[in-house]
Image (spheres, helix red, strand yellow):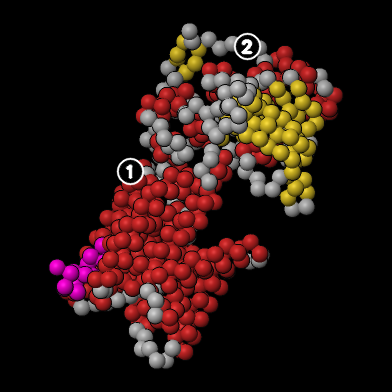
Amino acid sequence: MGLENNKFLVKLENTGVFQNNKWLVKGVSLEVEKGKIVTLIGPNGSGKTTTAKIALGLYKNIQGKVDKFTKKIGYVPQKISIDWTLPIRVLDFMLLTQNLTDDEITDALNLTGVEHLKNNNLRNLSGGEFQRVLIARAIAKKPDLLVLDEPVQGVDFKGEIALYELIKTISDKLNCGILLISHDLHVVMSATDYVVCLNGHVCCSGTPQAVANNNKYKELFGDRASTILSVYEHRHDHTHSPDGTIKRKQ
Amino acid sequence: MFDDFFIRALVAGLGVALVTGPLGCFIIWRRLSFFGDTLAHSALLGVTLAFSFDINIAFSVFIISSAIALILLKLQKTTNLPGDALLGLLAHSSLAVGLVVIGFLSFIRFDIMGLLFGDILAVTENDLIIIWVGGALILFVLKLIWKPLFASTVNYELAEAEGMKPERVNAIFTILMAAIIAISIKMVGLLLITGMLIIPAAMARNISNNPKQMVLFSIIGGLLSVVMGLFGSLEINTPSGPSIITAGLILFILSLIKIKRLSQLNN
């Protein structure tokens, strides 16, 4: 089977995880294609992270079937704590699971706006800075499949939008598939191709428009949630570099 | 050249320090100090086995330590006891059983002190070969698994998601720990081997800001401890194993000064 001919990167068929006498999530089917962004939304405890981990193959015993068609995967986990016993710089962290040239490291850190932190110790970063490093690490080797579990948590508002724009650009430019978990319905509705709404099972799924108009989605998130689609429509004409100077967009 | 007992001791000690340096770093990073201690305690059983069946000490210690590691994994899965309780259980029961077996072997005269604290001055040329060949092998394997091992030390799930097979490298690392204990038990003794693993690495942690640097300093610290300890023991006539560990402790205390300076700089 040639990887090139297959547009699917990962495919979940009726998957579920049963642990400690309860279902963490069940009956989830979805697929991530090249160049497409699939987003998982849902309330806390609805199984978003579990679903992402199923896709990554992190559970030993699952129900259903997972087919992965790539080994080049970049992962931004939801929670990651670096033990203080580890002396580790951003630079070392970038090389954690991959071999990169200096240019590749610098480029990736540049994209997420943290190039100046390259030699800093991971322990001394703020939450938002660390999140940017995590994203840079995941995209540095140009993976086929990106799994991003709330990638912009703790990032300031402006940075959040910029990072989501970056994620969109990456998906277009690298033609990689992205499985995204996000709380930010604005972003989900404006920048993704396919939305899966979870609540222990697949509650509804489809294009952002279809999901926004689905009654189950309205029940889960409230009526106002469906008006979100029209809200996210504005442009920025400039960004700021780390030292605060203004960079005009071309 | 290896005729002199002191030269043999020095060459053996330096060989051990080269290997304990990097392994010790991983033991600290992964919080496996007590685990190392448990493996070391079980080594006594390995030694008695070697005498009972007339096999090589390093070989039998390696087998017993690996077996204890496997038993620990099994117990962790099948009981509800916390990890440290299981380690304590295994450490002390294997030590006790070892001592009981020694009681049975009344036809052999044991140097218990040598077993507990090492007898680096009784190192034979054969031991040197075991240390250097075994040590080179351990370092070679560690080099091979460095990346996945380090990645899974930093974050297990991240490593697994990106195809690093953490479970396999963790198992290999456990075997490497059993191996270093096996080849160094005769030099430093089973009560002090964990010190040899941890103290230079702890010293290195105080003065380094990246993993490779810490490994390098840990090796240098171990080598220095061996040289200082052995010459010191020759000079003032102290037991060699404990002298090496004491030298390591002195280096650790010196490294604290650097930490103090660093934290003053940061404030």
In this picture, is A49 found above or below A83?
above
In the picture, measured across the screen, residue B54 lies left or right of residue A183, that is: left
Tell me which residue sits at (44%, 64%) in the image. B178
Q: In the orientation shown, which residue stands out farthest toward the front?
A: A1
Q: Main secondary structure of the magenta part?
A: helix
Q: Position of residue A23 (x, y in %)?
A: 77, 45
Tell me which residue sits at (47%, 29%) in the image. A141
Residue A41 seen in the figure:
no
Tell me which segment is drawn in magenta: B1-14
Tell me which residue sits at (60%, 64%) in the image. B74
Give the quarter of the image for residue A180: top right
How packed is label 2: few (under 14 Cα within 10 Å), some, or many (20 or more)?
few
Q: Are the residues under badges 2 and 1 in a single subunit?
A: no
Residue type marked 2: His
Q: Position of residue B190 (x, y in %)?
A: 39, 73
In this picture, is A215 found above or below A62?
above
Residue B93 seen in the figure:
yes
Task: Report the residue marked by disc 1.
Answer: B265
Callout 2: chain: A
Q: Magenta span has B2?
A: yes
User: For the residues carrying marks 2 and 1, which lies nearer the camera in this image?
Assistant: 2
Element on which disc 1 rests: helix
Q: Position of residue B191 (x, y in %)?
A: 40, 73
In the picture, measured across the screen, residue A28 lies left or right of residue B242, that is: right
Q: Position of residue B42 (x, y in %)?
A: 47, 73
Task: Report the residue marked by disc 2.
Answer: A234
Element on which disc 2 rests: loop
